[in-house]
Image: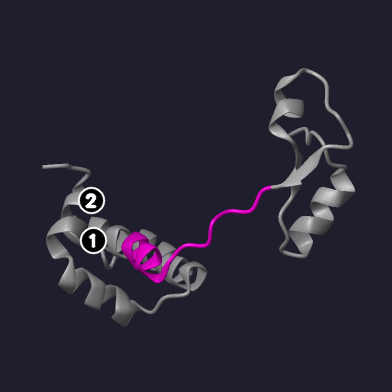
Amino acid sequence: MTETVGATREAVRGAIGAGQAIPLPAPAAQHSGSVVKDSLEVRVAKAKTLEERLWGAAVLKMSFRLRGAEESPAFKAIYPGVLRDLDVEDAAVEQFIAGNKERVEKAARGTQE
């Protein structure tokens, strides 16, 4: 079981249930060996831009496309959820691929050349 430092289990569950950030101890408190209960900070991930979201979906789709696996059960199970989570449409991903094909293919292959 994972231990939550600096927040009660109930607070974490409540934050997750409400879609909120989880309060964490300040960096100094995290690394000092003792947790200071008064110094909580909230860390929130930076919102991704539309281009970043399209990039992620495009690289995923291209990685399956390059292997000829767009009809695979894995792709069909994963890709719709990715589109939903990233709040993008497949047509927009295809348009992004068309405009950035070389970069997307390189990323999908994991090459830098």
The residue that appears at 83% across and 21% down in the rendered structure is 34
Query: Label 2: which residue?
Result: 107
The residue that appears at 77% across and 65% down in the rendered structure is 18
- Outermost residue toward the top in this view: 33
Report the mark closest to the observer, 2 or 1: 2
C-alpha span from label 2 to label 1 = 9 Å
Find out whether the residues at labels 2 and 1 contact each other: C-beta distance under 8 Å: yes
Q: What label sits on residue 62 in the rendered view?
A: 1
The residue that appears at 35% across and 67% down in the rendered structure is 51
In the displayed structure image, the side of residue 65 where residue 28 appears, left or right: right
Above or below, comparing residue 10 to residue 1 in the picture: below
Q: Quadrant of the N terminus?
A: top right
User: Considering only order in the chain, which callout, 1 or 2, is on the residue closer to the N terminus?
Assistant: 1
Instruction: List x then y, in percent, for residue 70.
Output: 26, 66
| Picture quadrant of residue 3 | top right
In the displayed structure image, the side of residue 4 where residue 72 appears, left or right: left
Residue numbers of the magenta segment: 43-57
In the displayed structure image, the side of residue 44 where residue 107 appears, left or right: left
| Picture quadrant of residue 94 | bottom left
Magenta stretch: residue 51 in it? Answer: yes
Q: Secondary structure at mark 2?
A: helix
Instruction: List x then y, in percent, for residue 61.
Output: 29, 63
Report the front residue among 10 and 31.
31
The residue under label 2 is which amino acid type?
Ala
The residue that appears at 25% across and 55% down in the rendered structure is 63
Q: Secondary structure at mark 1?
A: helix
